[in-house]
Each structure stands twice: as structure tokens, then as C-alpha cells.
Image (cartoon, coloured by chain):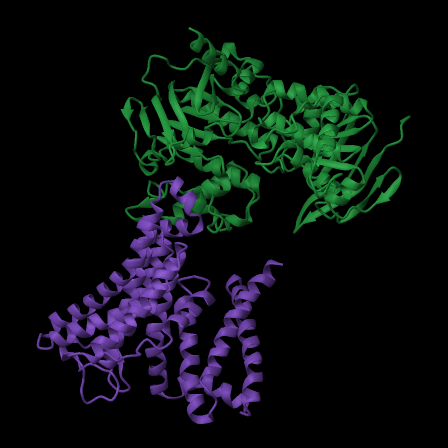
Amino acid sequence: MTIVRKLVPYLIAIIASFAAAGIFIALTGANVFQAYETILFTSFRTPNGFVQTLLKFIPLTLQALAFTIPLTAGKFNMGGEGQMIVGAIAASVVGILGADLPAVILLPLVVLAGVAAGAIWGFIPAWLLYKFNINEILTSMLLNFVSFQIIDLVATGSLRDPVAGHPTTVQIGQGGFLPMLINNPPLNTGLILALLVAAGVYLYTTRTTGGYELVATGANPRAASVFGINVKRMFVFSIVLAGAIAGLSGVIEVAGVQHRLIVGLQHNFLVLGVIIALISRGNNLAVPFVAFFIAILEIGASAMQRTMNVPIEMVFIVEALVLLFVLLSDVVRRR
Amino acid sequence: MEKEAILELRNIRKVFDKNVALDSVSFSLYPGEIHGLLGGNGAGKTTLMNVLYGLYRRDDGEINFHGQKLNIQGPRDAITHGIGMVHQHFLQIGNYTVLENIVLGTDVSHPVTMKLSAEAQKIVDLGNRFRLPVDPNAVVDTLPVGTRQKVEILKALYRGVEVLILDEPTTNLTPQEVDDLFESLRVIVNEGLSIVFITHKLREVLHVCDRITVLREGRNITSLTRAEASEEIFVRAMVGDQMEIEGSVYFSHGSMANTAADESAIPALEMHDVGLKTKEGISRLAGLNFQIRQGELFGVAGVAGNGQRELAECVTGVVIPTEGKILMKGQDVTGVSVCELLKDWISYIPEDRLHDGFLPKANVAQNLILGYHRQKPYCEGSIIKWDTVYDKVRGYIGEYKIKTNGPEDPGGNLSGGNIQRVMIARAFSMNSHLMVAHNPTRGLDIPSMDFVYNKMLERKETGASTLLISEDLDELLLICDRIAVLYRGQIVGILDRKDFDKYAIGRLMSGIQAEETADLRAAS
């Protein structure tokens, strides 16, 4: 009963946002119902559509978690994209340089390198916050731009694939590929990694003393510190953990999907991750479900653009409106 | 009644969300009387007066003033009608002079040049007339609380009010200042004004008020003249039937048996020359030397802001003193973190419950285990056992009468008094050698205060000690074995129970003795 009652505002928000966005779609001259049918059902029509949705779901979930974990402690990690990119860079550099190593050695190395790189990228703003009290929103965000330059440098440098038209590195060694769950359409084991991480984060924040301290820190840092919790350490820990998870999403893109480093692999993941995290209201259990829903919209939107010539940006409007309406339902409920 | 009421409130009703704060409350005020509005916390006293003063809009009922219906839109409107209110927390600009604070927001005779000599004269005259002597050119920040209150009363009188509402005016005053205040109030009503005196302290009301109205849970209970009633009747009216007055600590007039603490045992707490300086080098605490014996209830009195908070935080390990040593049961614990001390050394009820003790975004259960979450039986290794926690928490909710929907209710849903109950339940839930309680009964109704006092007295039986830091001197006199007085970060005197004297403590609180001894030292 309570779960149903909790879901009602979401459903209303979704319906309301679809209705509102429908006006814009109608203005472009397209058939609104057909457009929505494409958006909602592309993912379920073909096996390929479903796998594509899952492949989108993996980074979206991880990016959203990279935002919700620090949010639990009351901090904002705006550097998920940068952490993903450095994770991808580290994974591909290790994967290319160690191309001859056997899978048992190379694959763990690739994964570890990416996760560690993401964690380090998260540690920089966390340390600046710890040591000098510099706002983590600013520093984590700015580090994204640094990572854009680094990926350009790596993808156009000595590891560049000369035959590719787009800045791209050569393929990483076969041993660094994530094993496949299904070969055709291709679905890698990154899905399992993402689900394990999501479950682990949920269990950690709800069941353990460390997770409790994270929640207490976010609820009232002053009271938490009066009662013996080292809140500054919780801040650092949460942002570093977020960086590691974002780094993992970069690893999966490289080792699971592309098998090489491609400039622009981050798409819009930061913004979408934040939207997912906020629609979930920071609830780690809700994140995978919301992420799956957004993945459906994303895949449906590209199909809509291909078949109906409705610009893909239309789905951004829907996503933004869902968030707005969910936030609005909070205000309405408080009245 | 021979006299016509100047002000009548009839059937006032005020509802916050689903909470009925006032349920058809009536109140009348005659010219030239001091009317006490008595009741425990949450009885609706302040709400009623805020409705009158225009801070809250009433949901139902009417207000008659001089026989005419009045519809007050806001405080400014109330003042133009001649109704003034002095709040518990003064609304003053600290670095302005008394004169500037008083004339702020009124028309002055020379608005361009701001020559305020005429206004200053008026204030001096008012001060003389009502026995509220204040130097109009003094800067407010430099004045003691008692004088700042006089400024606040003058502010209302300057605006020509006929009805003056005082909300808990004696909080933070020393006993001497309270006597002064009462004297001025008498002068004011003799001049024909009327005063509403809001308080939860029965003895004050009986001392100064002509008529007394008792509120409980948002309802009128009774209205009586002082001559008509005995203390008994008011006590019963305030607390209702649910409380056993015979066995109560609150109404015991401090006649409880004073079980001697064990003086031979190692003291529970020893402070050796403890001092605390801020980063800027300003001294907050200096040269604190005292011991708390095992099984002793040790009180610290003082006007708020004289280092109480710093003292509590030094003892609990929240801040580390910059000088001196702290020993607990003979063991040096200087610099040991709160986290460690919370493991059966100390328990802590912080003063500022909202900022220092409560997690509004977390649920009741999460709040109740804060600080103890790494201890048994709440956790096993690094896993929190929520089943055990919820079981325990349900017990606390019942025992401490926390009004909530259950352990998973968000903390933000609790009222101030219930948050305080959470603080208390948490502090008493685990064994500790020393409890540091800072204003623990603030915001509680009388039965709950009594409950806390009983709990503290129970601790004595087991040999556990308590450091009770309180702004409520009556509370300290009631239950403490010894009282130390804190003034400007120093202990200016420690009194044994047999030497307890309200006025002696009051002198210490206002620093009089300290200055005298300093003078003596300088002379010798």
C-alpha cells in the first residue's frame, strides 16, 4: 500500500511530462502517439533494442550512483564524467600496453587501473575539500574539462588508430575484453558488475555502520561530528568511492563495449546521471529502476529520430519535465 | 467584576497543520493588572499572545479591545493600537546604542540631522518614571541581559502601549534582576497600564501576578485571582490528572534527601587548570579546577554565553582544551575523541538540540542510535542489526513518551519537545560514568521534566555522576548536590547543597563577587 502510494506521484509526473512534451512534438508536425509508441516500445520490440537499452543502463546506473553516494553524505559530485573518462583512459592504456598478457592477468589489471584512476580523480576535489574547504561542486566540475583534454591527447597521440576517421586509439588486447553474456546481440558482463555495485551500495548504506555514518553525516554534519563521526573523512570517502564507481563505468565502456578509447564516449552521462539521482531523490535502491526507465527513453528517442525525423533533443525535454514534475509533487505534497 | 475589561479574547482557535495549538481559548485583561499566563511548554501561551500581537492569524474567535472588535494585521498594527510584546529572544541590534534601538522604526523629530536629544530625554524620563534606569547612549552589546530586557520594555513603553506582553521575561535573569523586574512591573501597572506575563514558573506567577490564567494543551483550564487560590490548585491545573504530585521532584520544594556522594572514591571527573582559547586567541574558558565525585549530581549555573557550551564540549571531547588536563576516574582523557568517550565513559545531551544533536533527515531509530551505532547490541562487527535497534527504539518511544508514528518516522516530523525527548532517551539508553546534560529540560512539559529529574536521581543510586549545566537556576537548586557558577569562562564559586542561596548564586552569576575578590587581590 505504501509503495503504491509512493509510486503515484511518479506516475502522475511521467504522464504529465509526456502530455506536456507531446505539445512540442505536435508542433513539429509529427504524430504524437506514434512518437511515444516508438519511444516506449523500441526497447522491447527486438532483442537488439533490449540489449542496446541494457548497454545504456549500465553507465547510467553507475553515473547516478556516483552522484547519490556523496549526496547521501550531503556533498555534490559533479565530476562523474571526468572520472569516467580517466577510468576509460587508464583502462585502455593498460589494455594496449599489456596487449600480449593473458586474460587472467590483463583483465583484472584493466579493471583495477580504471577504477583506481576514477578514484584518484575523485580524490583531488575531496582532498581540496578536506584540506582547504574548497567547494567540491566547483573543483569536481572543473576536473571534467581537464579530462576532456587528456582524452584528446591520448586518442591523438602515439596510441592513435591511424585508419579511424575520429580520434580513437587502437584496440586493447583481447585479454582485456570483458567476457560476453550474449554474443549476438553483444551484451557484456559489465551488466553484472553494475548490478553488483548497485546492490552493494544499497546494502552498504542501509546495513553497515559505515553507511549509517554516511547517512548521519548527510542528515546533519554538525550533530554527527558532536557524536563522534569524523565527517570530513566521510566526505572524502564518499567522493572517492563515487570516483571509483564512475571510473568503473569508463572501464566497461572500453573493455566491454568499444574495446578502444573513443573521444566523446561520455555522451551526456553526467547530466543524465544527475537527473536519475534526483528523480530517485537520492535513494540508492530506486536508482537502477529509474536508470532503466531513462535508458528506455534514450534508446526510444534515437529510434524516433531515425524513423520519424523528430529531433532526439525532444526526449531531453521529457526527461527534464519528469524531474520537474517529481520535484513539484514534493512541493504539492508538503502543502 | 466592577471594572470593565480593557481587552477580551474570545474562543480563539489556531491550528497548525493537524495540530490544534489553541482550542477555543478565552482570556480577559483588566486595566492596571498583571495577568499571569501560566502553563507548561506547548500549552499554547505564546501562541495565544502571538495571535493577539498579530504574528499569527487566528482561525476562529474574536478580539475585543476597549469594547471594539479588533482585527490585527501584524505587529506594527498591534503597536499602533497600543499592544506591545517583549519576546523571549530580544530583537535588538547589538552594535547600536540603546537610544538608536528604541527609536528605530518610529518618527523622530529631526529625521535629516538625526539629532535625538529630545528622544533621549524622553527615554530617560520614561526610565525614571517606571524605574527602568538605562543609559540611552550605551551600546546594547555591552549591556547585561537584565538591562537589555529593560531596553526592550522601554521600547514598548516609548511607543505608548497600554498593554504589555512579556514572554518568559525571567529566563536568563539572575534572582536580583528578577526582583528588579517585578518592581518595575508593579510601577508600570500602578500607572494604569496592563501587563500579560507569560511563564511556566509557578512561583513567579504567585509572587507578582494579580490574576492568573492557566492553559494546558491549548485549552483554558482556569482563571483565578491570586487571593482566591492556593498553589495546589494551580499545580493541579497545570499538569492535569496524569501526574502524581506527591512523589514529584518538580513540586518538592527542593526538600529531597541529599544522599552523600562517595568522597573517598576516585572522582568521576577531574578538571585541572582547563582552559580553551579560540584560534584568534580569545579566551573562552580559563583555569577551570573542579572535581565531580562518583554518584554526584554537579550543577553549573550562569547566565547563558559565559562558557557553558565550551565547558560541555571540552568534557565530552567534542573540542580539545588548549590548556590543562581532564581526568575521568583517574585516567587522563584529555584529547580523547567523543567517539571513544561515548563508549561507556560519557553520555551527552547537547544544548542546541537542532544543530548539535538531531538528524532531521534521518528517522527516529537512526537518531536514537547516533553515537552508539558502533556499540553492542546495535551492531555486530560492521553490520547494524536493525531488528534489535527497532525493538529497543520501540521501547524508548514508549518509556520516554516520544510522540511519533514509530521508529521509521522521519525526524523532521517531531516537535521540539519530542526532539528533546529523543535527546534524553539517547543519553539515558546506554550506561555512562558521567552524563553531561546541557539544558536538558528545555521545551519539556512538567511531567516530562519530572521524569528527567527522577532519571537523574536514579543515576546517583548506581554511583554514576551527572554534570548538569542549566540556565534554570530553580532546576539546579532542586536536584544538585553542588553548584558551580560560571562567569566569563571561569568558575567563580562552588557551593555545597547546605549553602545553597539563590541570591548568593545570583551575585556570582552577575560577576559581583568575582570583581570584589579581584579588587581585594589588587589591593593586597
Chain A hue?
Answer: purple
Instruction: State the residue at coordinates (14%, 77%).
Output: A96
* B493 or B155: nearer the viewer: B155
Say left or right for B20 vs B492: right
Extreme residue in the right direction: B2
In the image, residue B204 lies at what x, y percent? 67, 22
* A323 or B215: nearer the viewer: A323
* B381 or A234: nearer the viewer: A234
Residue B432's place in the image compared with B68, above or below, is: above
Say left or right for B233 vs A280: right
Residue A41's place in the image compared with A100, above or below, is: below
Q: Is residue B38 visible?
A: no
Question: Where is residue A187, by image quadrant?
Answer: bottom left
In the image, residue A208 lies at what x, y percent? 33, 51
Q: Is residue A107 visible?
A: yes
Where is the N terminus of chain B found, in terms of image quarters?
A: top right
Q: Which chain is green?
A: B
In the image, residue A232 lies at what x, y percent? 34, 48
Say left or right for B56 vs B142: right
Instruction: State the residue at coordinates (56%, 66%).
Output: A328
Instruction: State the residue at coordinates (43%, 75%).
Output: A293
In the image, residue B261 lies at what x, y percent? 41, 15
Extreme residue in the front direction: B113
Question: Where is residue B131, by image quadrant?
Answer: top right
- Disc tally is 0
Residue B349's place in the image compared with A324, above or below, is: above
Where is the C terminus of chain B found, in terms of image quarters?
A: top left
